[in-house]
Amino acid sequence: MASSSTPPTTLDNYLPLLSSQDTKKKLQIGIDLLNYLNIEDNTIECEHIGAFIDSIIHWLNNSNFKVAQSGLEILAHLAIRMKEDLKPYLSSILGPTVDRLGDSKECIILEKLMPAFTHKNYKVREEICLFFQECLLRYGVFGSTNGQLYVSKFISPLINLMSDPNSQVRDTSMTTLVSVYKHVGDRLRNEILRKYSNQMPAQKLHTLLGKFDDIANTGESISLINSNNNGNCGSKTSALDGVLRAIYLHVHADKLSSTESINQSD
């Protein structure tokens, strides 16, 4: 068993252990498996990789939050190790993963990740913006079930990131605000003018409002998508990127929350 002094040495050997109904054993199996996946020299070749992935997906629905969290971490490691080889299994992974990440009974993911908006690493600041866009695409801004997302509290950090030292972060934060506008329209424009216009350089404000005008003039908008709809989330590649982004940020939420916020470009 996985809790012994000699954990399994292949994914195929782990497979029969994944169906254990004992929560303590499951948690230990998760620890052993993550340790295994963390070592790049350990092979991820698996004769029954489809069954292995299906078993991990079942962990996401476990009533024990730690088991579900372990499942997310395992999927994240598999995605990093398997890369393009994970694509055939994406349709099975995408729904349960995003639904779990959007489960408000566990935590409000974006609120927990607020420190990411001011993290010292520019890539984390960029990733939280991209994840925010992914949530908008998946859930919209209103909802009465899982995935409920309210955007007002995130406007201020997004406005601040428009003056970030890193150009990628600046561009991505503006794109994110434009995505919000596509969902809520002039409510966002009015809120920015009322609360934040004095905090923004005039040129940046002009550029942002110009992008809002372009959307308003063309009638471009995004229909609200919630977890009960079968919306098209884009290509399989972009969907995989979204899942990886969501898993990465979710898995690192506690670390990000405890990290001192230092704003630097790299």
Image (cartoon, grey):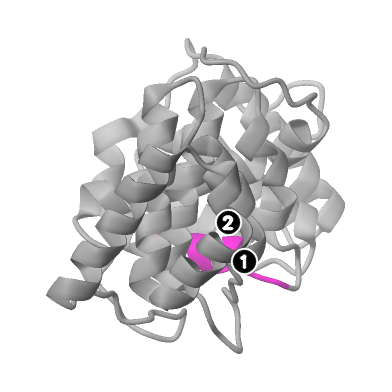
Image: magenta residue range: 94-104
Q: Residue furthest left?
A: 218
> Which quadrant does the N terminus fall into?
top right
Residue drawn at x 60%, y 23% as measured from the top left = 36
Label of residue 233 in the image: none
Label the magenta part by its dominant secondary structure: helix
- Check residue 155 in the rendering and tell me which mark sits there, or answer none: 2
Residue 178 drawn at (x, y percent): 35, 58
Question: In the image, what residue occupies the spot 74% across and 21% down?
Answer: 6
What residue lies at 18% left-to-right and 78% top-to-bottom?
A: 219
Q: What type is the residue that disc 2 sits on?
A: Ile
Place residue 30 in its image quadrant.
Answer: top right
In screen coordinates, is 27 left or right of 154? right
Measure the C-alpha gap from mark 2 to mark 1: 5 Å
Q: Nearer the viewer, residue 23 or 176?
A: 176
Tell me: 166 left or right of 59. Answer: left
Residue at the disc numbered 1: 152
Instruction: Give, as a three-letter code, the residue at label 1.
Output: Ser
At mark 1, the secondary structure is helix
For label 1, count other residues whose C-alpha is less than 10 Å away and answer few (under 14), some (14-19) or many (20+). Answer: few
**SS class of the residue under badge 2?**
helix
Give percent across and percent down for residue 90: 32, 55
Marks 2 and 1: CB-CB under 8 Å?
A: yes
Q: Position of residue 145 (x, y in %)?
A: 60, 86
- Count of picture labels: 2
